[in-house]
Image (tube, grey):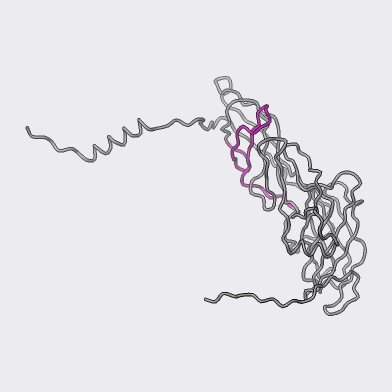
Amino acid sequence: MKRKPYNLNMLLIGLCCFSFLSCHRMPLYVLEEAVRLDLELNLDLDLDLDFDMDVDIGMDAASIRQPEYFKALFYPSSGTLGYSQFVEGTGGAISTPPGTYELLLYAFGTEYIQIRGEASLETIEAFTSDISASKMKSYQKLSSTKGSDIPIVYTPDHLLVARGTVTIPELSDEFPTLILQASASSIVETYSFEVPSVIGAEYIESAEAYVTNQARSYYIGRMEPSTEPATIWFPVGVDRTKGCLYTVFNTFGKLPGESESLLHILIRDTQGQEYHLSTDITGQFGDPGSRIVMDEQVVVPPPGETGGGIAPVVDPWDDEIVDVPIG
């Protein structure tokens, strides 16, 4: 009997179909397009500014950027994390199983802020990193705090956070769709700062500032700052034409109670000479958005001269040998 040759193409198609039918796995939970989160974002800041933000200060603390993504965390009644997923900056489909949850959302992709402790609402915390070793050394010189165990950290950028209780029912003919709504706002406090009278501002190359007795972090599940003290660092803008120093900075909040907040400013002139000034700004921490002003006149002498209105801090020059790779 003469056999007909197999059609190789038909054989491959048949094997593929068999593989699909026998190995296809159903997902544990199917993304339900009928459950959607709508996010309203509060991007406005009410700042008392008496200067033009026309000089780069290194961080745009005076505005809140629209985030591309949020992380949505769902905590059941136990208070420990049940589910999490990412949604777009204005919301999106939710894939969480039915139930009642505490929903916590935070903007993903901030420049300075990091998040830890997501396992529970009690422990989830926003914080910033310690400053660099060179900035730490500069601070220790100007504040005489060498050996202190109080951390010195970068000022936080804006972190948009929303929290609320949500109930997701079993979808049925009675509940064909569900829209969850949430409003997110920044958890940091923003202040403006100015030294309006600087003689010799044209000799300034750069300036930076440190503020003591600020909250080290913020517990976004509890919506409250920590009570651990920290000093925050931020850059300061120099307007050489108008003769002033100014900036906008963020903080997780001043420590409660009668703790004293000192402002230390470090100025470097065009030849690398360092000067500093310090002042007590405890009484100027009012409502977020308020303006902190140093009324004293500051005098920066021409490079190579001394006798300015701020105390110089200068290190001796040391020889340094550095290997430079060639080729």
Q: Between residues 279 and 72, which one lies in front from this camera angle?
A: 279
**Residue 147 falls in which quadrant of the image?**
bottom right
Check the picture and name the quadrant holding the N terminus.
Answer: top left
Q: Between residues 251 and 320, which one lies in front from this camera angle?
A: 320
- Image position of 114 with respect to 280: above or below: above
Task: Specify whether 322 is left or right of 191.
Answer: left
- Image position of 56 with respect to 178: above or below: below
Magenta includes 250? no
Q: Which residue is drawn at 80% across and 62% down?
A: 139
**Residue 72 falls in which quadrant of the image?**
top right
Q: Position of residue 4 (x, y in %)?
A: 13, 36
Magenta includes 83? yes
Q: Give the range drawn in magenta.
A: 63-92
**Residue 101 falls in which quadrant of the image?**
top right
Q: Where is residue 277 in the image (x, y as percent from the top left)?
A: 88, 64
Q: Residue at x 74, y 41 (%)?
A: 219
Task: Specify whether 17 is left or right of 168.
Answer: left
Q: Between residues 48 and 281, which one lies in front from this camera angle?
A: 281
Q: Position of residue 303 (x, y in %)?
A: 82, 78
Q: Where is residue 148 in the image (x, y as percent from the top left)?
A: 82, 56
